Amino acid sequence: MTQTTEAAPHATPGPARPRRQPRPRRSRRMSPHRAWFVAAVAFVTIIGGAAFNSLPGLLIGPLHQEFGWSRGEIGLAVSIDMALYGLTAPFAAALMDRFGMRRVVVVALSMVAAGALLSVWMTASWQLMLYWGLLVGLGTGSMAMAFSATVTNRWFVARRGLVTGVLTAAGASGQLVFLPLCAWIVENHGWRPASVTVALAALVVVPFVWLLLRDHPADVGLAPYGGEFVPKPAPQTGAAKRAVTVLFAAAKTGPFWLLAGTFAICGASTNGLIRTHFVPSAHDHGMPITAAASLLAVIGIFDVIGTIASGWLTDRFEARRLLAVYYALRGVSLLFLPMLMAPSVHPPMIFFIVFYGLDWVATVPPTLAVCREQYGEDSAIVFGWVLASHQVGAAAVAFAGGVARDVFGSYDVVWYAAGALCAAAALMSLVIRRKPAFVGEVKG
């Protein structure tokens, strides 16, 4: 009996073997973490959402010829789309906290597909504003920076910077993938098949989102990549109120308005100007639509390189000065653009495209850095509102550029005006104070 009683204590330590369980975890680490699959789905989703953003610049000419709508009317629809894209972003994260990423993204993709398909049967300009402006604007806005930030914050602790950069570049990749294809379809088969192609691209992504995307690592019993296991938080109902509260608090500070102003000019000189009006402007000078669209696709390639390089520079140099340099160089390049327009592609134009691609989203990392310096824990929400100003600026120039083309018969005045705005943005960047002007977290 004594042996048995002595054996029992030795038998009980037997369960200590679970200490060997880390070995299976090590073997699991040899395979990709589920977070990378979620990031891949997010990447494809953002590309699908970006596909429609590549269309407006291609369709201005065809819609003008078929329906007789002015470029100002068409530009107004594009501007509504861009404005809603930006204004939706601060609230998209709140919707994802309340209903989950998967549901919000599926609805957003469905809205983009519906807007693209319904436009095939439109006969009046107000329908263009409803389908392109409202439906697509709300849909793409729900899959913008808020989606990228939510995926990164929930699924990653390590490699957040890398994932953020890759997802930010997904929009440019969507432009790269769809622009030449859509341009070829428009030129050879008309604008309606191109719109249907974009709708199908959005619908194809839906099943991947529903089957592979998960709202939180805890849903599948995992810890975020590079972190410890965290239980899934309860749905939050006050996030939208907090977004508005932070906006009102930040709006009382000077740096917020300087950041919003510079980023509005950034949107005006990229999405609102080049993405919307470069193709029709080049076509005015005799360049084929496919050639002009291919040049925009090249911008998408160098956009990725420029974003990564700008992040590297932001870690090493003062963000305000980087912003000033970026805007100044962008403004100078726009002043030369009217002289570069020609029926064919030549080396100076290629140089402009490469340079503009490197500078396209280079402003994002230093703008984020200044937001972080000025607003601390509220910087993500503040940046969401600064991003909204980016899209408002883009919307204004998308509309104004079309009106200017109708009035002056040329885009030259638009390029010169945008160059002057970029010079103003460079000066505004240097005016931002270095000391934090907003301390503490706003609680809603």
Image (cartoon, grey):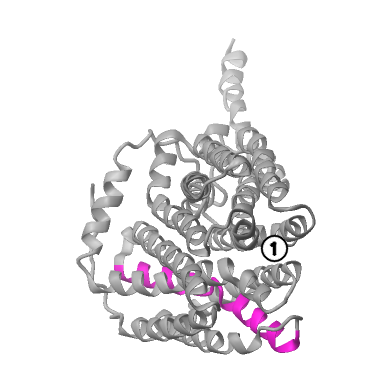
x and y percent of residue 23 in the render?
A: 68, 41
Mostly what secondary structure, the magenta segment? helix
Residue 21 is inside the magenta segment = no
Report whether residue 317 is seen: no
Tell me the quarter of the picture where residue 20 sits. top right
x and y percent of residue 385 in the render?
A: 35, 59
x and y percent of residue 150 in the render?
A: 48, 48
Is residue 191 depicted above or below 434 in this figure?
A: above
Looking at this view, name the residue that lies furthest to the front.
Answer: 68
- Residue that mark 1 sits on: 176
Report whether residue 251 is seen: yes
Say left or right for 400 vs 197. left
Instruction: Residue at 61% x, 63% y: name it.
Output: 57
Label 1, residues with CA under 10 Å away: few <14, some 14-19, many ≥20? many
Q: Amino acid at mark 1?
A: Leu
Depth check: give the residue in front, 64 or 223.
Answer: 64
Depth check: give the residue in front, 312 or 109.
Answer: 109
Magenta stretch: give its range: 346-374
Residue 368 is inside the magenta segment = yes
Say left or right for 216 vs 379. right
